[in-house]
Amino acid sequence: MTQRPPHALDAARPEVAAIAAAERTSVVVIGGGINGIATFRDLALQGVDVVLVERADFASGASSASSHMIHGGIRYLEYGEFRLVRESVRERNDLLRTAPHIVHPLETTIPIYSLFSGLLSAPLRFLLHRSGKPKERGALLIKVGLVFYDLFSRGGRVVPKHRFSGRRRTLEALPDLDPAVKYSATYYDAGMADPERLALDVLLDGVAAHAGAHAANYVEAIGLTPSGVRLRDRETGAEFEIAAEVVVNATGPWVDLTGAELGEPSEFGGGTKGSHIVLDHPELLAATRGREIFFEYDDGRIVLVYPIRDRVLIGTTDLEADPAEPVVCTEEEVDYFLSLVHSVFPAIPVDRSQIVYRFSGIRPLPRHDGEAAGSVSRDYRIEQAPSSSRRPALLTLIGGKWTTFRALGETLGARVLAVLGRERTASTRGLPIGGGRDFPRDADARRAWIDRHLGGVAAPRREILFARYGTRAAEVVRALGDGPEQLIADGLLSTAEVAYLALHERVAHLEDLVLRRTDLAFTGRCTPGTLDQLGAALASALDWDLERLGREIADCGEVLRRHGVPAAEGAGRA
């Protein structure tokens, strides 16, 4: 985010005012990615007074740069990470039940080009913890992995078991696939169309769970004090202190930078960079037949071609990265992605003109001196700083991934409760999230729910609202009132809905709305006119003057250009 000069109107942020006025809380969670948010919700459900602060927007860092998958991590079996795979499969199944408005079953197919390859090298990696480039994985090795994968899912199965196909059946199902394929394995994981919205639902559930739970974006922790934490509101520059018994550093790839800022230097992190591109390519989308194609590229990397919305997501890389520097998807990575598509769908041309969005983030991995990036553990751990009577207890989270956020939040919450000397009173296991509550489970139930709760809304808008909010759409429609809607962004939003998002979903800047409260940027639907419309609606809701409006549109346009969205050119020049 570009640092903006203070603006008098920015002081009217009730969540920041509430934190400053409280002066004291039990726990401060630093970091508003999904793992910090999950910990915040878990503690709020125990009735613990807890404050969460995020220096940018919620879920704007590593949490916004994922592959949009909820998965067990079948390849982690190769490295002996059975605990992580077991937990991941359990959490995947749980999320399919608790967040069905965002998390959905994802049929996944692995093209296979040999029978026996990898049978020796994979056990050696497991037994001797070897890293480096793996040899090609053959059908027998993949079969063994999927049998174990199904076993981990047997207790709470919500998706079908895997199946194998020979060349003929594979090409009948996926006729555009590389004709050199010999076998394919198909299994189910889960996808999430809007990770940022899922993170926001978890956050809002936490805020609603307890009156002593407060969360603020654009607030940074700038140091520990003898009694708590010193905070700075990045919107106004105002600084204040809040007393706390426990401080949690959940800043993902930036744990060491945050530790240094707090006066507790560490060397825990070793994140790697992962990039993706999004294509508007109807032919490639059709070629996937609605399946994720998950395969091994020539360099041994496991990569994916994933249909999402009406676009195709391609990823990912695994490169060393410096968390002190911003990361972007480079032209070399784009070349890599285009070549990998050609390797699996050789007859379908792809080029840069079809890219509507590109993004990059740093995985919150542990330090891994000399170990190949792809083999670094995706598991998590918690470190506690040596106790001191002069400062609050400091817990630092290392690692973690999207799939296991609930279990991680509960584990970290338990450590906090132990420090506080409190007992757990509630579990998040099986607890519906946001718009997943009372979610209709089939097409008939969906139609009935929409007719009953959104019947007063014009037909196209009903589906848009239901897709964006799930069953929370009923609450949104009530808040919008009965007046006529002024539609903007080609009918994807209205001025009243923008005002709702600003008020209820902590929108502080135009980029929050475009990149994280909606999928307008991700799907490439940001024209200059769209930015102008959204900016004007947000200016009305937040009482921006013309100077602030112009700055917001320019800043958002610059962010979009870094994501490869040239359509932002010209915004605000009408």
Image (spheres, grey):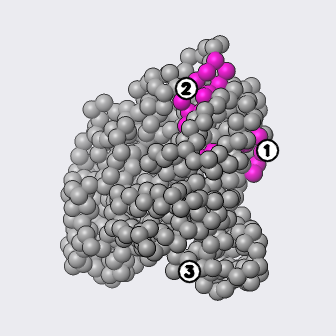
Closest to the observer: 345 or 15?
15
**Would you say 246 lies left or right of 126 here?**
right
Magenta stretch containing residue 217, yes or no?
A: yes
**Disc on res. 223:** 2
**Would you say 437 lies left or right of 148 here?**
right
Would residue 405 be visible to someone looking at this image?
A: no
Would residue 118 be visible to someone looking at this image?
A: yes
Which stretch did the figure color magenta?
Answer: 208-231
Marks 1, 3: nearer the viewer: 3
Q: Which residue is mark 1?
A: 211
**Location of residue 356 (image quadrant):** bottom left
**Would you say 358 lies left or right of 444 here?**
left
The answer to whether 510 is drawn above or below residue 26 in the figure is below
Q: Which residue is mark 3?
A: 491
Q: Amino acid at mark 1?
A: Ala
Question: Residue 49, percent across and down?
Answer: 74, 36
Closest to the observer: 461 or 490?
490
